[in-house]
Image (cartoon, grey):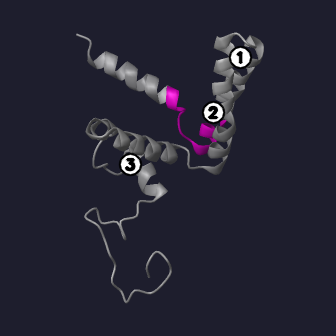
Amino acid sequence: MSNNGSHNNGSHSSTRDGKQGGVQTATDTRQQVQGTQPATTSGAEEAKSCPIAGVNWFVKDYIGRHSHPVNAALHIVGVPAAFTGFFLLFSGKDVGRGALLVFVGYLFQFLGHQAQGNEVGEVTLMKNVYKRIQRNRF
């Protein structure tokens, strides 16, 4: 049976990566991000070849890390709140409200990642930076 529910007489189209119909699911993306399935190229390699490919990799990675409905919903509220808070904070328009929005925005994002069971992106970034610094020490 094909992806659209119709019978196709037992023939399945598959791509060179073995995926039925060439469709990559959220589970496939999550497995690549979590390292349980080898990705064909890294985000850095894609970004070097074409800026749009780098954006494409980022979006796939982001979707994989935010696929839980609670995490996605909390990010829909938390990310704009944090951005607005940073604007208010650094523009000096309303420092108190800005600080509160940054705190609440990041709290929502943290709670979303707790619901999904993975790390907040900034924590992952800091770990990667630390590892890179440690690797380059003499």
Distance Cα–Cα, label 2 vs label 3: 24 Å
C-beta proximity under 8 Å, tags 1 and 3: no
Front: mark 1 or 3: 1
Number of the label disc, if any, that sits on residue 79: 2
| Circle nearer the N terminus (1, 2) | 2
Give amino acid for label 2.
Val
Give amino acid for label 3.
Gln
From the viewer's perspective, is 97 left or right of 48? right
Label 1 belongs to which residue? Answer: 99
Query: How far from the left and from the top, in percent, is residue 35?
Result: 37, 45
| Circle nearer the N terminus (2, 3) | 3
C-beta proximity under 8 Å, tags 1 and 2: no
For mark 2, give the secondary structure: helix
For mark 3, give the secondary structure: helix
Query: How far from the left and from the top, in percent, is residue 132?
Result: 32, 21
Q: Nearer the viewer, residue 26 or 82?
A: 82
Using the rendered view, name the quadrant where residue 1 is placed: bottom left
Using the rendered view, name the quadrant where residue 25 is placed: bottom left
Give amino acid for label 1.
Ala
For mark 1, give the secondary structure: helix
Query: How far from the left and from the top, in percent, is residue 61?
Result: 44, 43
Distance Cα–Cα, label 1 vs label 3: 36 Å
Magenta stretch: residue 112 in it?
A: yes
Q: Magenta residues? A: 111-122
State whether residue 22 is above or below residue 102. Answer: below
Label 2 crowding class (10 Å Cα cut-off): few <14, some 14-19, many 20+?
some
Label 3 belongs to which residue? Answer: 32
- The residue depicted at 31 percent of the width and 35 percent of the height is 44
Magenta stretch, main secondary structure, is helix
- The residue depicted at 68 percent of the width and 22 percent of the height is 85
